[in-house]
Amino acid sequence: MNESENTYPAGLTIDYPAKADRLSTFFRLLWIIPIFIVLGTLIGGHGRADTLNGYAFIYTGPGFLFLPTLLMIVFRQKYPRWWFGWNLALAGFVTRVSSYLLLLRHEYPSTDAEQAVHINITYPDVEKDLQRGMPLVKWLLVLPHVIVLYFLYLLVLIVTVIAWLSIIFTGEYPRSFFDFVVGVMRWSLRVFCYSILLTTDEYPPFSLT
């Protein structure tokens, strides 16, 4: 595991599937509809639909406790533990759905079990680790990441189409493609934790690992 994965207070690993499911891969956009509906009820139907990036789908929705957390950090220097637990659980659910959509995993996404998608987000010591004013400017500081991730997700789209064809005809997701897509999702998660979940003030690395 790369050093940045060890040290940054947010990480993601996804187990490489031992066997790909050709049937569910072929009908993936159909199979995923029910769990998308469940996810939509959690975010209130206001999230930006984005089939490339599960986090982008949920970022603008009311499901994540962003504004209340921002206010608590700025005015009270507190991050209620149960708010963190909710955000962590929802981030895991979103990532499982995204992994299924992007053909990284083939078991149907669970609403609560971790399955083969492993998220590690460190609960912050607010007084020690977070500065009061930082949540007000993080949206600006992450703009370079947003620009880079936009182009990376265009590549993810191309890679996913190629992987779909590969699974259908060979039964395998090319490992190099798999690692690239997981890396982009890992990068997204770090930016998400920095700017939306507000769990860290450590600037995200420009890295897939």
Image (spheres, rainbow, N blue to C red):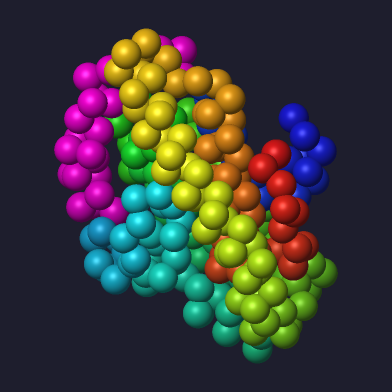
Q: Viewed as shown, does residue 178 lie left or right of 26?
A: right
Q: Quick one: which residue is furthest to the bottom in this view?
A: 75
Report the front residue among 97 and 30: 30
x, y percentage for residue 52?
40, 49
x, y percentage for residue 8?
75, 50
Report the front residue among 168 and 68: 168
Q: Where is 52 relative to 167, above or below? A: below
Q: Main secondary structure of the magenta part?
A: helix
Q: Where is 47 relative to 36, above or below? A: below
Q: Quadrant of the C terminus?
A: top right
- Can residue 121 be spotted in the picture? no
Residue occupying image coordinates x 52% and y 29%: 178
Residue 154 is covered by the magenta coloring: no
Residue occupying image coordinates x 40% and y 29%: 162
Residue occupying image coordinates x 23% and y 26%: 26
x, y percentage for residue 115?
44, 30
- Can residue 39 be spotted in the picture? yes
Q: Where is 137 relative to 99, above or below? A: below
Residue 26 is covered by the magenta coloring: yes
Q: In which image quadrant can residue 64 be found?
A: bottom left
Q: Viewed as shown, does residue 141 lie left or right of 71?
A: right
Q: Quadrant of the N terminus?
A: top right
Report the front residue among 176 and 79: 176
x, y percentage for residue 18?
46, 13
Give the extent of the magenta segment.
17-39
Count all numbered tags in the image, as a single digit: 0
Residue occupying image coordinates x 74% and y 67%: 201
